[in-house]
Image (spheres, rainbow, N blue to C red):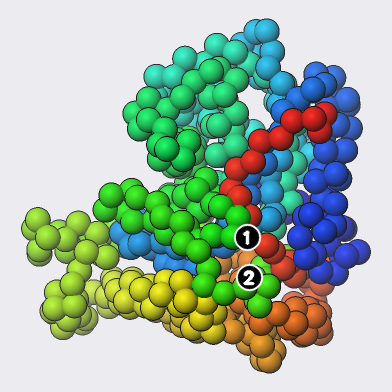
């Protein structure tokens, strides 16, 4: 998705945004959505609002499609979707962030075929209809809706947040519940993750993993989300210290990243798929994904393949080493040792930059800058790579120094992005929240 122009001016005025609750962002979001609904004649009086978060991955970045365990938190940059049920089967929806796209209108069950709609945000609501219909869910009731988001550039999962929101909304309006994987005691179903991911993989054609969807859908305020891929089990892990002793920062480089299907992510995903196939042939019944390698198998593969397949060995090396650090990071979170969490985060960043080779120059400039600030515990690129946002973990009280360092050094390195970059310090929050009474 393209950069959100309406957010840029607000960012530059504010300088640093601590949280949505602090700056009244939700009130602004509601007013902008009301204004857009009035412009297009959408009936959203008494509408419900579903708010889905962004995410901050603490490990393992790019581990989802390679079979590692995952850990992260939901963060308070959001997608808001206000919706009201209609009496027919039409959907009318518009985005505050993409005003030039106008009003998107269609009849449920008749979304354009995958790959046939122009590159625009409307592919996401069309994709939600396509995926649910293809899965056998009867969509007979439409809705009027308006959408607004303030999630910064690539790295904090705008597309996954929007996809989850749309799937949940279409199912709710049509009184549907997941049928393949029933709701658990927590009211969640992993099928929602699958459906949201399919919007990107099957409809848009993006080679997305499932890390983003999991970290948003299952996120809980004040807790880390631990995903175990062998069983699809989700555990919520309390932080072993006062959350006010540190801050999580998103460093928006001001760059626009193309969809994952057009990025280095697609190349790395294909390489890892090839490596996994070769490994499964070498160790039949023992290895299906890179993360399945044990230490002895890893050493054997590195020795045998290093000369013939150096690129594949680099991908394998990053995943194996990051998998080894994962338990250290998780134990540190549980015990409240944020310094060690930051150290692992930083080491993973070096691996993403030098071994997995999926970072980008602007992302690394941000990391180089904040690394010099006393109190910065760790930093690295976030998300799919190439462009978008980096992240940092800093001691409480270091936020203003980070901002000052970025404001001084980043425009010198990239003067063309002076009016686009931003620093956000975010809070850990629930991934999905439904609200009434705002409209």
Name the side, left or right, on which 317 lies relative to 240. left
Residue at 54 percent across and 60 percent down: it is 223
The one nearer the camera, 234 or 4, is: 234
Q: CA distance from mark 1 to mark 2?
A: 9 Å
Name the side, left or right, on which 298 lies relative to 348. left
Residue count near mark 2 (Cα–Cα under 10 Å), binned few <14, some 14–19, many ≥20: some
Residue at 61 percent across and 50 percent down: it is 430
Residue 31 placed where, x, y %? 88, 38
Residue 210 placed where, x, y %? 43, 50
Lower sequence index among marks 1 and 2: 2
Residue 344 placed where, x, y %? 46, 80
Q: Circle 1 is placed at which residue position?
A: 428
In the image, residue 398 sits, relative to residue 331, either above or below, namely below
Name the side, left or right, on which 44 lies relative to 319. right
Place residue 235 in its image quadrant: bottom left
As drawn, the label of residue 243 is 2
Residue 250 placed where, x, y %? 67, 68
- Asked if marks 1 and 2 touch (Cβ < 8 Å), the reply is yes
Place residue 305 in its image quadrant: bottom left
Task: Name the residue at the top extreme.
Answer: 87
Give the position of the C terminus as an image quadrant.
top right
Residue at 52 percent across and 45 percent down: it is 217
């Amino acid at each position: 998705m393209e950069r959100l122009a309406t957010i840029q001016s607000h960012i530059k005025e504010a300088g640093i945004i601590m949280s949505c609750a602090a700056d009244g962002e939700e009130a602004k979001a509601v007013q902008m959505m009301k204004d857009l609904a009035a412009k297009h004649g959408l009936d959203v009086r008494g509408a419900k609002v579903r708010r889905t978060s962004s995410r901050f991955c603490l490990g393992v970045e790019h581990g989802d499609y390679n079979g590692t365990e995952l850990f992260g938190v939901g963060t308070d940059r959001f997608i808001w979707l206000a919706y009201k049920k209609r009496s027919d089967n039409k959907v009318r929806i518009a985005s505050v962030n993409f005003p030039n796209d106008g009003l998107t209108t269609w009849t449920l069950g008749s979304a354009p075929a995958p790959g046939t709609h122009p590159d625009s945000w409307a592919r996401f609501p069309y994709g939600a209809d396509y995926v649910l219909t293809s899965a056998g869910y009867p969509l007979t009731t439409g809705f009027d809706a308006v959408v607004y988001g303030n999630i910064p550039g690539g790295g904090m999962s705008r597309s996954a947040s929007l996809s989850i929101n749309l799937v949940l909304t279409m199912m709710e309006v049509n009184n549907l519940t997941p049928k393949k994987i029933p709701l658990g005691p927590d009211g969640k179903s992993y099928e929602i993750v699958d459906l949201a991911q399919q919007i990107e993989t099957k409809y848009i054609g993006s080679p997305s993993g499932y890390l983003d969807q999991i970290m948003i859908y299952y996120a809980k305020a004040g807790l880390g989300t631990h995903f175990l891929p062998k069983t699809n089990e989700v555990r919520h892990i309390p932080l072993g210290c006062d959350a006010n002793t540190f801050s999580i920062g998103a460093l928006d480089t001001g760059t626009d990243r193309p969809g994952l299907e057009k990025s280095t992510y697609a190349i790395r995903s294909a390489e890892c798929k090839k490596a996994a196939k070769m490994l499964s042939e070498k160790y039949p019944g023992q290895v299906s994904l890179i993360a399945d390698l044990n230490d002895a198998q890893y050493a054997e593969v590195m020795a045998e393949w290093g000369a013939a397949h150096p690129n594949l060995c680099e991908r394998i090396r990053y995943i194996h080493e990051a998998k080894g650090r994962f338990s250290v990071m998780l134990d540190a979170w549980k015990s409240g040792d944020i310094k060690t969490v930051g150290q692992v985060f930083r080491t993973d960043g070096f691996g993403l930059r030098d071994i997995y080779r999926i970072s980008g120059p602007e992302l690394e400039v941000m990391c180089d800058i904040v690394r010099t600030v006393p109190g910065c515990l760790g930093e690295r690129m976030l998300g799919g790579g190439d462009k978008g946002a980096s992240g940092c973990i800093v001691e409480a009280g270091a936020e203003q120094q980070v901002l000052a360092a970025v404001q001084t050094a980043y425009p010198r390195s990239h003067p063309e992005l002076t009016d686009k970059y931003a620093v956000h310090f975010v809070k850990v929050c629930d991934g999905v929240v439904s609200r009434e009474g705002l409209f």
